[in-house]
Image (cartoon, helix red, strand yellow):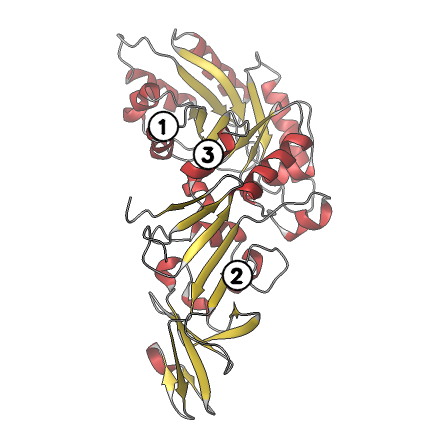
């Protein structure tokens, strides 16, 4: 075991796969800026290491959800452009200026209040991306009138730079015409004013399903890490993505249950015959929720059922006789069509692959594999 972590449960992250996925989108959209989205700690896989690897391979513009995430990247030497997709509290606008972070303007009223926070002595620029709500019903302005008024406000301030405009698709990963309707509305509003340097509407699903010459940038989140936004998208594109995460543990104890003996909280599992069980040191505090009872993990190629309630730190599985202490357990596989794929885990958890990745706890060490080296990042011991 490495001296950089002291448990036998960890996440392997294939950086070569992430770079390959980034390059897939560069080829799909050769004349556009491909903007890797590294919010939520890089969808659970580590924003800093992912961003560094992608910078080394040509990425010039990253997106995150919060100002804190942007500043974290800056603190670790990421000097590329960064856009915060969410709303920044207006009282912290000067932190965005200080760290050279582009911000999202969701409304005219927000911008009016934000400008009040910028001191007259400020001599640094603030890059702005205006958010349009074309059907998501979330952040952004809905009318061309407000959009033009916001641009006028920006242009009236010497250190505000109108760098971009964007929207977000609500149903790009589903059948139907919603995405096209949103794109049409987006183009109609944006076309009524001078265009900024960056125009972007496509998320992972949009970038896989559609090419629009109106935009010159695409935001790639889940698919950067090798996962399709939905089964519908996967079945309707001829694009191969490489899943980049593998979640590993090991058997730390085995024992025999006799008929009538129970395991775990609530004793909800009772053996009806002599049964060999194994304990693995992973639980819901790691991102493996209680609803995984009845699912399976892979031990030496054998599918082993999770029995009893998943505990905070440990899970119990039913194992064949040949399984021993120290045998490797695959909790989540880095292949897309196996019983332990992120999609299979998502189905069991009644959620989506995005959430499976984002649930990966900070106490899980990340082991990064690339063509150059192997690096371990442990959030608890940094």
Residue 51 got which mark?
A: 3
Bin the neighbour count of mark 2 within 10 Å (Cα to Cα): few under 14, some 14-19, many 20 and up: many
Q: Is residue 349 visible?
A: no
Q: Quadrant of residue 200?
A: top right
Dot 3, how many residues are within 10 Å of its Cα: few (below 14), some (14-19), or many (20+)? many
Please determine whether, in this image, residue 31 is positioned above or below residue 225.
above
Q: Residue 374 placed where, x, y %? A: 45, 45
Residue 28: x, y in percent?
A: 68, 32
| Secondary structure at numbered mark 3 | helix
Q: What's the CA distance linking mark 1 and mark 2?
A: 34 Å
Q: Is 63 in front, or is 90? A: 63
Q: Is residue 193 visible?
A: yes
* Dot 2: element: helix
Q: Earlier in the sequence, mark 1 or mark 2?
A: 1
Considering the numbered disc 1 on the image, is that residue within a helix, a strand or a loop? Answer: helix
Coordinates of residue 271 in the picture (x, y in percent): 44, 88
Name which residue lies at 51% across and 15% down: 148
Mark 2 or 3, nearer chain start = 3
- Which part of the image, by quadrant, shows the N terminus? bottom left
The span from disc 2 to disc 3 (Cα, nearest Å) is 26 Å
Mark number displayed over residue 380: none
For disc 2, the marked residue is 345
- The image position of residue 351, as x and y in percent, is 51, 57
Q: Tell me the mark number nearer the camera, choosing from 2 and 3.
A: 3
Would you call the spot at circle 1 few (<14 residues within 10 Å), some (14-19), or many (20 or more)?
some
Asked if 268 appears above or below 15 in the picture, the reply is: below
Q: For marks 3 and 1, give the CA distance.
A: 11 Å
């Amino acid at each position: 075991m490495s001296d950089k972590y002291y448990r036998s449960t960890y996440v392997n992250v294939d950086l070569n796969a992430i770079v390959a996925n980034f390059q897939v989108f560069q080829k799909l959209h050769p004349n556009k800026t491909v903007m890797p989205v590294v919010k939520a700690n890089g969808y659970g896989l580590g924003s800093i290491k992912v961003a560094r690897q992608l910078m080394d391979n040509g990425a010039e513009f990253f997106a995150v959800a919060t100002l804190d995430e942007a500043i974290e990247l800056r603190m670790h030497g990421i000097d590329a452009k960064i856009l915060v997709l969410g709303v920044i509290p207006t009282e912290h606008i000067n932190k965005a200026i200080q760290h050279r972070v582009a911000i999202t303007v969701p409304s005219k009223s927000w911008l009016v209040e934000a400008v009040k926070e910028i001191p007259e002595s400020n001599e640094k620029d603030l890059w702005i991306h205006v958010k349009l709500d074309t059907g998501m019903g979330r952040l952004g302005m809905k009318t061309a009138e407000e959009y033009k008024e916001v641009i006028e406000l920006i242009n009236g301030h010497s250190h505000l730079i109108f760098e971009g405009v964007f929207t977000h698709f609500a149903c790009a990963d589903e059948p139907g015409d919603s995405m096209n309707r949103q794109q049409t509305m987006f183009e109609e509003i944006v076309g009524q004013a001078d265009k900024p340097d960056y125009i972007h509407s496509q998320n992972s699903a949009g970038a896989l399903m559609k090419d629009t010459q109106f935009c010159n940038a695409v935001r790639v989140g889940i698919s950067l890490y090798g996962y399709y936004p939905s089964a519908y998208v996967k079945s309707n594109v001829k694009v191969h993505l490489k899943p980049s995460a593998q979640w590993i543990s090991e058997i730390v104890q085995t024992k025999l249950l006799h008929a009538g003996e129970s395991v775990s909280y609530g004793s909800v599992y009772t053996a009806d015959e002599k049964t060999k069980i194994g304990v693995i040191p992973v639980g819901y505090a790691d991102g493996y929720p209680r609803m995984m009872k009845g699912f399976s993990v892979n031990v030496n190629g054998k599918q082993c059922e999770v029995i009893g309630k998943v505990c905070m730190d440990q899970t119990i599985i039913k194992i064949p006789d040949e399984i021993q202490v120290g045998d490797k357990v695959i909790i989540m596989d880095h292949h897309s069509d196996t019983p332990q794929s992120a999609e299979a885990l998502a189905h069991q958890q009644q959620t989506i692959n995005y959430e499976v990745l984002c649930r990966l706890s900070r106490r899980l060490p990340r082991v990064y594999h690339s063509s150059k080296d192997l690096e371990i990042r442990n959030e608890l011991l940094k």
